[in-house]
Amino acid sequence: MLVGVGKPWRQLAHVALLAGVLAGCAQAESKAGTASASPSESADSKGAEVAVAQSGGTVGATGSACELPVVFDIAESWKAEAIAPGAGAGGGEDELSDAVADALLHQGPVTAACEVDAKPAGNIGYLRVWTGEPGDDEARTVLEAFVAAEEGTSKEKYRTFKAGDLTGVEVEYLHTSELLDETKMERALAVITEEGPVVLHLGGMDTEEHEAMLPAYELAQRTLRVS
């Protein structure tokens, strides 16, 4: 039994069995969930309409759903849940799936600490937070290692960003799944804090879902600050 990870990580551990079902659900639900981040519409400098997520609260501070080195706003209706250290521990008939789940908790130099679920708002996807140990690595180094640890990535585009007093690095890239035989867009960002590096990652079942959830990711990035 996974402790503190919840059903999403159990589903990932059985991804080979559920791939067909999840792919079908993604197509059906993506059309119904394009307002997953509860966006309002505002005009940019060119007059185009831009989706802006409404805040549904914050995570990261002491006493919040996830206690992290950073604090940021989560989109309305999205639900945050902490991922407990050593969550893959288990035994018996679930030993293999627990081992797979435990492996999924680590990517490059960081470990999964929190996931913010978009399903309550109508989409299939998560904004996941990964944390690491303090060190000398810069944000881009951490982010490059994080992306390199995810097999099937290509066309990475890195850029710097500022959020309050924080300066970080963001990457946009493509991820190709051999299992599902499809390519989708993903994004991640990294900042360095005194407690270590923090990575925020937005995936999604497919590119359509990813784009629908972008307002929530941008809200988190815009409001990111040290806790």
Image (cartoon, helix red, strand yellow):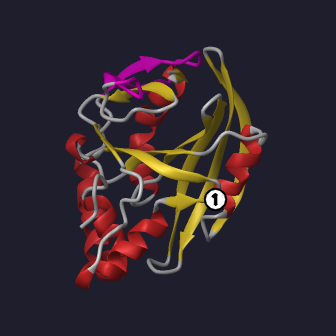
Q: Is residue 84 above or below residue 163?
A: below
Q: Magenta region, mostly helix, strand or loop?
A: strand
Q: Which residues are magenta?
A: 39-62
| Residue 16 horizontal side relative to residue 49, left or right | left
Q: Is residue 4 above or below residue 214?
A: below
Q: Amino acid at mark 1?
A: Gly
Residue 151 spot, x, y in % from top left: 61, 70
Front residue (pair 12, 38): 12
Is residue 20 rendered to the left or right of residue 192? left
Task: Give yes or no for residue 42 being in the magenta stretch.
Answer: yes
Residue that appears at 70% across and 56% down: 145
* Above or below, comparing residue 54 to residue 105 in the picture: above
Instruction: Locate residue 41, reporting x and y percent.
Output: 37, 22
Which residue corresponds to the image point at 77% horizontal and 42% vertical from the top-left? 137
Q: Nearer the viewer, residue 200 or 37?
A: 200
Camera-nearest residue between 23 and 102: 102
The answer to whether 184 is drawn above or below residue 23 in the figure is above
User: Which quarter of the figure is the N terminus placed in?
Assistant: bottom left
Magenta-drawn stretch contains 171: no
Where residue 150 appears, as percent x and y from the top left, is: 60, 65
The image quadrant of residue 5 is: bottom left
For disc 1, the neighbor class at 10 Å (few under 14, some 14 to 19, many from 20) is some
How many marks do you count on the picture? 1
Task: State the residue at coordinates (30%, 53%).
Answer: 30
- The answer to whether residue 33 is left or right of residue 197 is left
Q: Which residue is mark 1?
A: 108
Q: Residue 32: horizontal and vertical position, in percent?
A: 22, 49
The structure residue drawn at horizontal position 41% and vertical position 75%, both measured from the top left corner, is: 99
What element does badge 1 sit on? loop
